[in-house]
Amino acid sequence: MALPARFGAPALSTYQRILAIKLADLGDVLNVTPALRGLRWGNPAAQIDVLVNPHTAALLEGSTLIDEVLSFPKTSFEGLAVLRPAAWRPLARQMRWLRARKYDAVVNFHHLTTPLGRAKQRALIAATGAPVTTGLDNGHGGWLTHPVTDEGFGARREVEYWLALAGRLGASCPDTSLDLPVGAADHQRAQAVLAQAGLGDRRFAVLHPGSGGFAPARRWDPPKFAALAAALRRLFDLPVALVGTASDDIGAVLAAATSPLVDLSGRLSLKELGAVLARSALFVGADSGVMHMAAAMRTPVVAIFGPSNHLAWAPWTPGSPSEVVRLGISCSPCAYVGHHVGLRQGCPERTCLADLDVDRVLAAAARLLGSEPGVG
């Protein structure tokens, strides 16, 4: 394919091989799936591959939106690791391998936020040799052949930015929901785990007190999760299951509990967790990948936001109910605002979460459950 003019793209149907790049965490990968659907909808015959971190690859396995999931160990090239010559050998091999796949177009689903990140993304995309490259341009993307203006974090929802990138190649699709393919075996295993926990035929809620290791400052206090769980059981007769890992403050919630809790932490694969979320009547958690998984499974979501930018990462739920709960104080959000990372870990006081009480979250849960406390 000949190199196109910078602002004129061939028809989407002319691309035979498309590479999408999203080297980020679980929720970020789910947020690009509506754009992937647009690419597939507009060009069903194309080979569409996605390059992701190894720990997120399982999310896309079995998806009809793409043909192949490729993994790239991004964490091996972060921080001081980039100064080690040994770290560059596997990177060089991966770049040669990508070039050999002869992609017609590359879609970079990333903001060009930091100098090092920009350099790595540009090098990786240049290595593919693709004649068409689209991505967000915040003033540092002059090397993209088909840029889309980056107006800053929160000026658009992240999903909307990624849909705009697909649209730059001529893609569109009326269905903009998130996609998390969960197979029959995952549903069967989830049902077995729930039955063993006494929830097989019960209406229940899921709480996730974690937020991943990238930004623990997003987390609400564990005793407040415990108090919320007790209120959901007392007022709505709704038992509560905790999900996550050992690093997600599960132990602290259990220690503060005043009512029975079902601990499912560490017992589910990603897809099995998706199946559990699909069966739940309600999800409550902070800004995290699990929150976006609940949105993808069309579970009613109460999302608790503090330092992170709700205008960018609120749950994307075009076909199901959700609410963002936050205090809205003047200094929040303080992370990922404008074109900057900002205070990724928030301020030491974290007033935006420390002062967020249980009653405010419980009221949002009641609205999504469609009943007043005591009605159940």
Image (cartoon, rainbow, N blue to C red):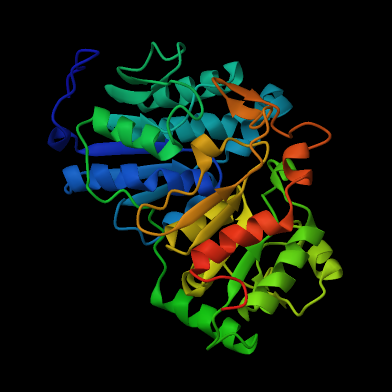
**Image vertical order of residue 148 relative to residue 33, above or below:** above
**Image vertical order of residue 60 relative to residue 256, above or below:** above
Write the residue at 64% across / 62% down.
Answer: 362
Which residue is nearer to you in this view: 289 or 357? 357
Q: Residue furthest right?
A: 255
Residue 304 lies left or right of residue 108; in this view the side is: right
Q: Quadrant of residue 208?
A: bottom right
Which residue is nearer to you in this view: 326 or 223? 326
Q: Quadrant of residue 260?
A: bottom right
Write the residue at 50% across / 30% down.
Answer: 154
Q: Quadrant of residue 239?
A: bottom right
Write the residue at 51% across / 69% down.
Answer: 369
Answer whether residue 221 is visible to the viewer in this image: yes
The quadrant in which the C terminus is found is bottom right
Which residue is nearer to you in this view: 177 or 69? 177
Write the residue at 52% across / 58% down.
Answer: 301
The quadrant in which the N terminus is found is top left
Residue 4 lies left or right of residue 63; in this view the side is: left
Which residue is nearer to you in this view: 98 or 17? 17
Answer whether residue 43 is visible to the viewer in this image: no
Image coordinates of residue 116 in percent, x first then y, are: 60, 19
Image coordinates of residue 294 in percent, x first then y, are: 50, 60
**Image vertical order of residue 320 relative to residue 276, above or below:** above
**Image vertical order of residue 26 relative to residue 342, above or below:** below
Image coordinates of residue 163 in percent, x first then y, are: 32, 37
